[in-house]
Image: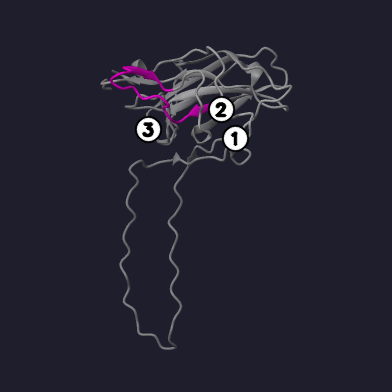
Amino acid sequence: MNRRAMALVVALGAATMLAACGSGGLATAPATPVPGSYFASPGPSPTPSSAPATSATPAPTPPMATASPAPSPFPGPTYVPAPQPSLALPASGAPAIPTGSRLDFPTAACISMNPNESCESLRVTWLEANPTGVTIRVYAVTTCLHIPSASMRSAACLVDGDTIPIGFLVLLSSAPASAGSFSFVLGVGETTAFGWLPGFGPDVDAVVLQAINTHGGSAFAIAGSSGSCWGCTL
């Protein structure tokens, strides 16, 4: 069964957000993401410094052979985590949760930043009741919260009412609420997830949206969730 067939795209039914979001029970990450920092080219290896002499007339030391560094299994730009913004919490005056949220797969060609990585274009769409001054944050969820078993033959990775651990939320980008959609690219291959963050990063098991303004943030809306079934093979 191919990856697309395994994905269980879940349209928004109700609000899904972090538990204890308004209770202060969750830590927040450092502020301000670095745009486009999914990729970082490997830098040169540091050169070891010579040890200081312990004698005024040290004995000559024969030259040491230096081994060549092992080649990367994925040559080219690779994924490096970016700093994440602080979570926007519910507050008086915060925007309403986006409605009509969905994830689809347009036919637009994608461009992979890594020549050894296949890619696919995805797009999220939404409606916001009052988009004035509102921004939509598009997050990847990099864990599957529900694993199928013999008693539960199939499972979506994320469903309404789930608690999303903050460490598994990765901001893909932000867009004006009035835009109504946002397109992005994932690396793809043999996985039950939608794909992975470009540069062979973590799997993306679900995509959620949050509306924010200067007051705070809405609950999360599920744009799409992948899933799997007991005993199925790719």
- Regarding mark 3 in the picture, which secondary structure is present there? loop
Q: Which residue is mark 1?
A: 25
In the image, 94: left or right of 66?
right
- Is residue 195 located in the magenta-colored stretch of the structure? no
> Amino acid under label 1?
Gly
Q: Are marks 1 and 2 in contact (CB under 8 Å)?
A: yes
Main secondary structure type of the part rendered in magenta:
loop
Given this view, does label 1 or label 3 mark the residue nearer the observer? 1
**Which residue is depicted at the point 54% across and 40% down?**
82
Q: Residue at x 52, y 20 (%)?
A: 161
Q: Residue at x 63, y 34 (%)?
A: 24
Question: Which stretch is magenta?
Answer: 138-157
Structural distance between the alpha carbons of marks 1 and 2: 8 Å
Residue 56 drawn at (x, y percent): 44, 88
CA separation in Å, label 1 and label 3: 39 Å
Residue picked out by circle 2 = 19
State which quarter of the image contains the N terminus.
Answer: top left
Mark 2 crowd level (few <14, some 14–19, many ≥20, 10 Å Cα): some
Nearest-to-viewer mark from 2 and 3: 2
Q: Amino acid at mark 2?
A: Ala
Q: Magenta stretch: residue 140 in it?
A: yes
**Other-residue count near label 3 (Cα within 10 Å), few / some / many at <14 / 14–19 / ≥20:** some
Q: Residues within 10 Å of mark 1 (few under 14, many from 20)?
A: few
Q: Which residue is mark 3?
A: 117
Residue at the spot 57% in from the left edge and 37% down from the top edge: 84
